[in-house]
Amino acid sequence: MPRQYTYGPFRSRRLGLSLGIDILPKNKLCTYNCVYCEIGPTKEVVSPEFRIKLPPTSDFRNELKSILKYVPHLKSLSFTGYQGEPTLNENLLDFYSIILDVRRDLKWTDEPPLITLFTNSSTLYSSEVRERVKHFDLVLAKLDAATENDFISTNRPHKDNPDVKTIVESLVKLRKDMPNKKLAIQCLISKSYREDFISNDNKENIKQLAYAIKKIKPDIVQLYSIARIPSEYFVFAIDEKRKKQIVKTFKEIINNDLIEINYY
């Protein structure tokens, strides 16, 4: 049958073999217009208050079952936000509940796959959104910038988006809301070809990111860079040497062995 909700499985750099779950309309729906986005520009950037009601049909359960029986070694069932920010869908937990049921009913080679959620963190100031998000086994929350200037230039948010300080406080609250689940902070760092565009790979932003992460106290930090064609031509990936330098800075400032810091 035609696939409406899933794509893959694919090999994720950070999660292993994953099945992507897409719960948004087929046109990109996001609160950001990130310069590095691999999906392309966001033609209509929406407010973090914007919501859609797009509940799962009976096809969702059937589609999951038809695919998952062939991948008993799957590591992650990932709400990836392939078409934007998944928390904009008010029916997020309806999809989650079906996945939970299907996962429970199937046999797995090792441990059952994690149910994971990727979010750009823009909606987490809402207690209602955090209440939904806290159920996931692993939440991978974006934080590319910890200064307001870097946030505006890198993520190019909707005018109604909360500022960086509010986003960091939202992540602190989320961490406290999900004591038995895992939170990963994802930082995508890039360079710029343009002299008039200061990328988020600058000393102040890296330092402030480290202090923000120290405050959030996530389980995991994932540092990575551009791996596919970005939305804007003038940004490009940092190299492995630079990733190692940033990780070193993070570890020195965060100074917490309980936080796992990796680069990809």
Image (cartoon, helix red, strand yellow):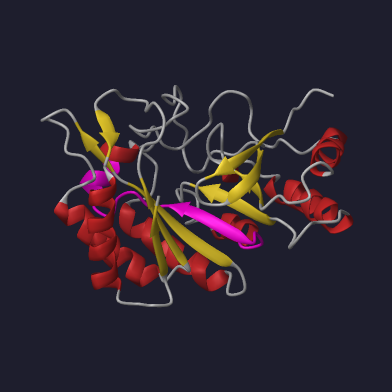
Query: What segment carries the magenta color?
Result: 134-152
Left or right position of 127 against 245: right
Left or right position of 150 against 41: left
Residue 132's x, y, as percent? 64, 57
Residue 92's x, y, as percent? 68, 47
Q: Which residue does the image show at 51% across and 48% down from the upper left?
A: 119
> In terms of depth relative to the viewer, which is nearer, 98 or 67?
67
Left or right position of 60 against 81: right
Q: Which residue does the image show at 66% across and 44% down from the upper left?
A: 90
Residue 150's x, y, as percent? 24, 45
Evaluate whether residue 3 shows in this view: yes
> In terms of depth relative to the viewer, which is nearer, 212 or 51?
212
Q: Which residue does the image show at 67% across and 54% down from the upper left?
A: 115
242 magenta-colored? no
146 magenta-colored? yes
Tell me which corner region of the image, top left, top right, bottom left or bottom right, holds residue 251. bottom left
> In terms of depth relative to the viewer, which is nearer, 2 or 9?
9
Tell me which corner region of the image, top left, top right, bottom left or bottom right, holds residue 101. bottom right
Q: Which residue does the image show at 64% across and 28% down from the upper left?
A: 25
Evaluate whether residue 88 shows in this view: no
Above or below: residue 134 compared with residue 217: above
